[in-house]
Each structure stands twice: as structure tokens, then as C-alpha cells.
Amino acid sequence: MAPAQTDSNAVEDWSQSTAVRGTLTGIIAATNLELQVPEFNATGSGTAFGPALSGGAFQGTLGYDDWRTVRFSGPLDFEIVGGGVVPGATVVNFSLRGQSVATLTAVGVILGANLGLVGTFTWN
């Protein structure tokens, strides 16, 4: 799978944001992302395949413009793109058909060789 085309790497670039929590765990060949959005009572998960070494629960912020697009438009691609404006943060971009729809900044994740991994994320 090719990396998603993203327009934004910062939560601040979006018109809306919400608090999230979750886990990002990667062992050897896959990274699993689990996400909870308490404000909207939504949960979802995704997997990216490739060299991986990370682990941990996180608190974070999800920036977006339209929650309905993020939540109800079908599976999203996600890409772990690295550190954000917050030191020690991990940034994950979400896209739909090649267009960015949200950015997650997660604090508390122990990040290893996950950068650049691309996977598919589905809401429950």
C-alpha cells in the first residue's frame, strides 16, 4: 500500500478537535492502533504491516474538519509520520481516498521503527 497523500501534520491545522485515548503496539511485523473518542462514543482499530517496535497507551488530540466524514465514510488509511509539535508526541495522519481527513497527536507512546508505516483503520 502506498503512503497516504496528506495535507496536514498538525492538529492545529483543522477546524475541530477532540480528546482521544488509545494504544499503539508494534511487534516485529505489524503495528496495531486502537482509538477511543469519548466525546462521540466511538472506537476503532487498524493495523499497519512492516518493521515495528513500539508500545504504550496514549492520550491525544484528534484534529478534523467534519466528524461525519472521519467516522462514517468507510475505512481510512493511516500513516505514522513521526513526531509532532509536542516533544515526545507521535503523529498519525488519516486519509480517505488520498485526501487527509484527520490528524492524531498522541503523547505517551514509546515509538520505535514504526515511522512511515501505512495501514487501514476501521471504526466499530
Image (cartoon, grey):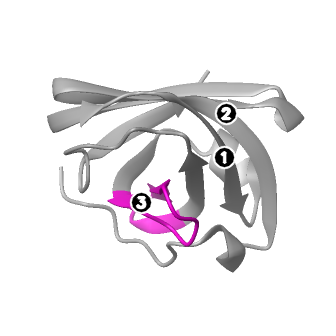
SS under mark 3: loop
Q: Which mark is residue 60?
A: 1
Identify which residue is drawn at 54% across, 40% down: 108
Q: Left or right: where does residue 47 sit relative to residue 27?
A: right
How far from the left and from the top, in percent, is residue 80? 36, 52
- Among the two numbered marks 1 and 2 on one chain, the one whose residue lies closer to the N terminus: 2
From this view, report whether residue 66 is shown above or below residue 114.
below
User: In this orientation, which residue lies closer to the viewer: 15 or 10?
Assistant: 10
In space, the residues marked 1 and 2 are separated at their CA atoms by 6 Å
- Residue type at mark 1 is Gly
In space, the residues marked 1 and 3 are separated at their CA atoms by 24 Å
From this view, report whether residue 8 is shown above or below residue 48.
below
Span highlighted in magenta in the image? 81-100
Does the stretch in magenta take in 28? no
- Tag 3 and tag 2, C-beta contact below 8 Å: no
Q: Check disc 2 and report the residue beneath it.
A: 21
Q: Dot 2, crowdedness within 10 Å: few (<14), some or many (≥20)?
A: some
Q: Which mark is residue 49?
A: none
How far from the left and from the top, in percent, is residue 97? 41, 60
- Tag 1 and tag 2, C-beta contact below 8 Å: yes
For marks 1 and 3, give the one nearer the viewer: 1
Q: Check disc 3 and report the residue beneath it.
A: 97
- Residue type at mark 2 is Arg
- Among the two numbered marks 1 and 3 on one chain, the one whose residue lies closer to the N terminus: 1
Does the stretch in magenta take in 95? yes
